[in-house]
């Protein structure tokens, strides 16, 4: 490794490690009404810890644990921002937890089906998989923020794999992704056997590698019924080698439709990841958008988008501009009513023109224009 990249790694990755500490799972009183609580079923392959404010640490577990967590999101906040609780917490301005309950493995599927039955319209599960350097509590809060800001009313599930939750834990996290693949496939199998008509999967950063490896495993073991329910698949800032990603896509006998990838050419985290790998580009850097389009992927380029309180690496969830665009696009599609395949393509094309190059559609759709 050259001196320049090494110094960048030290100052950007290692030094901030001294300042990081997982945010607490601060309990919020039941009678507080200055925000909204969002229920999330959290599955994790982390080992539990004795600290109630953390619940789970970075150690790996062979067993999946499940909890039902009600994530508190205050009204007084900027769109896309997460104000982590400090001290005893301030529910008027900070995130928190209104409920934390353990769920036995045998009760997970009945709980999901019960909640699906209460949904009006499409019976969808939303599954979020966090990325590198994310402690248990941070992933829980991020899931609640996404549900709140994107007005997601699906049955929410979060998979928390054993990230070290430290900038210096990059290699540990990479190994944890490989360790967690079987548990993630187990979770997908549970979700696939539910009454859900579709499963919306969103993975972030290194978590996208876990998502793709899990889907590849489902395909290789013939569990195509689960794959057929995945709609859409969204990969935000994927920390995956471009060649590896193409192989993963090719291995899927049933491909999710659509597949959406968020990229940014100025994502510093992915740039460092590329340097650590001897210059091999990451999918999330968006260096070859045309190749992704040819592979049937819709690409959303966040390089020049307003970031809010976040970074390019977290812009998929923290950018007020992106959140508003997605909500506007959803409104436009709802106006058309229940669209068939051809009109869905029309909506995508309209959105592509509206966002002036932010969205790059798959080549197969462009050929239909």
Image: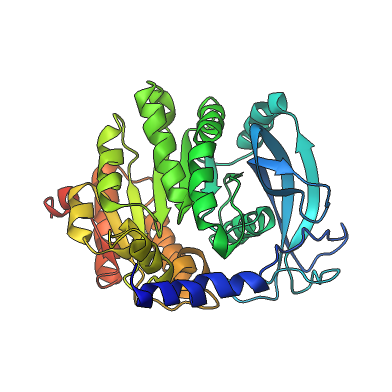
Q: Colour scheme used in the picture? A: rainbow
- Which residue is nearer to you in this view: 246 or 150? 246
In the image as oriented, which residue stretches furthest toward the top? 222
Examine the rendered structure and indicate whether residue 289 appears above or below residue 223: below
Q: Pinpoint residue 345: horizontal percent, then vertical percent.
A: 25, 51
Residue displayed at 54% across by 53% down: 130
Q: Nearer the viewer, residue 279 or 236?
A: 279
Give the percent coordinates (x, y) of residue 98: 80, 55
Residue sitting at x 38%, y 25%: 224
The residue that appears at 37% across and 33% down in the rendered structure is: 216
Spot occupied by residue 67 in the image (x, y as percentages of width and height): 72, 41
Residue 8 is drawn in which quadrant? bottom left
| 270 w.r.t. 210: above or below | below
Which is nearer the eye, 97 or 269?
Answer: 269
Q: Quadrant of the C terminus?
A: bottom left
Quadrant including the N terminus: bottom left
Q: Where residue 58 appears, x then y in whole percent?
A: 66, 49
Residue 350, image quadrant: bottom left
Q: Is residue 123 visible?
A: no
Q: Is residue 95 left or right of residue 190?
A: right
Answer left or right for 281 relative to 211. Answer: left
């Amino acid at each position: 490794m050259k001196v320049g990249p090494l110094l960048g790694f030290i100052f950007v990755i290692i030094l901030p490690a001294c300042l990081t500490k997982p945010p607490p799972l601060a309990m919020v009183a039941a009678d507080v009404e200055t925000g909204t609580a969002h229920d999330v079923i959290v599955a994790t392959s982390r080992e539990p810890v004795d600290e109630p404010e953390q619940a789970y640490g970075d150690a790996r577990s062979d067993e999946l644990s499940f909890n039902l967590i009600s994530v508190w999101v205050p009204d007084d906040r900027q769109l896309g921002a997460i104000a982590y609780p400090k001290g005893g917490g301030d529910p008027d301005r900070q995130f928190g937890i209104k409920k934390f309950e353990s769920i036995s493995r045998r009760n997970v599927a009945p709980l999901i089906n019960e909640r699906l039955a209460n949904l009006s319209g499409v019976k969808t599960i939303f599954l979020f998989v966090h990325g590198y350097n994310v402690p248990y509590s941070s992933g829980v809060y991020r899931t609640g923020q996404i549900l709140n800001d994107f007005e997601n009313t699906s049955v929410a599930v979060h998979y928390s794999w054993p990230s070290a939750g430290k900038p210096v834990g990059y290699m540990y996290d990479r190994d944890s992704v490989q360790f967690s693949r079987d548990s993630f496939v187990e979770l997908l199998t549970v979700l696939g056997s539910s009454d859900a008509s579709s499963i919306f999967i969103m993975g972030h950063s290194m978590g996208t590698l876990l998502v793709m490896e899990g889907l590849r495993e489902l395909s290789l073991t013939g569990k195509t019924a689960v794959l057929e329910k995945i709609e859409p698949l969204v990969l935000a800032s994927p920390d995956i080698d471009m060649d590896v990603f193409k192989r993963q896509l090719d291995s899927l006998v049933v491909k999710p439709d659509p597949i959406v990838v968020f990229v940014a050419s100025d994502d510093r985290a992915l740039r460092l990841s590329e340097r650590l790998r001897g210059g091999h580009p990451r999918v999330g850097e968006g260096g070859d958008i045309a190749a992704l389009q040819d592979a049937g992927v819709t690409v959303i380029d966040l390089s020049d988008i307003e970031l809010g309180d976040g970074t390019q690496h977290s812009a998929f969830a923290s950018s007020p501009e992106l959140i508003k665009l997605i909500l506007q696009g959803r409104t436009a599609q709802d106006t058309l009513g229940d669209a068939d395949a051809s009109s869905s393509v029309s909506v995508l094309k309209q959105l592509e023109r509206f966002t002036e190059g932010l969205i790059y559609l798959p080549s197969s759709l462009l050929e239909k224009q």
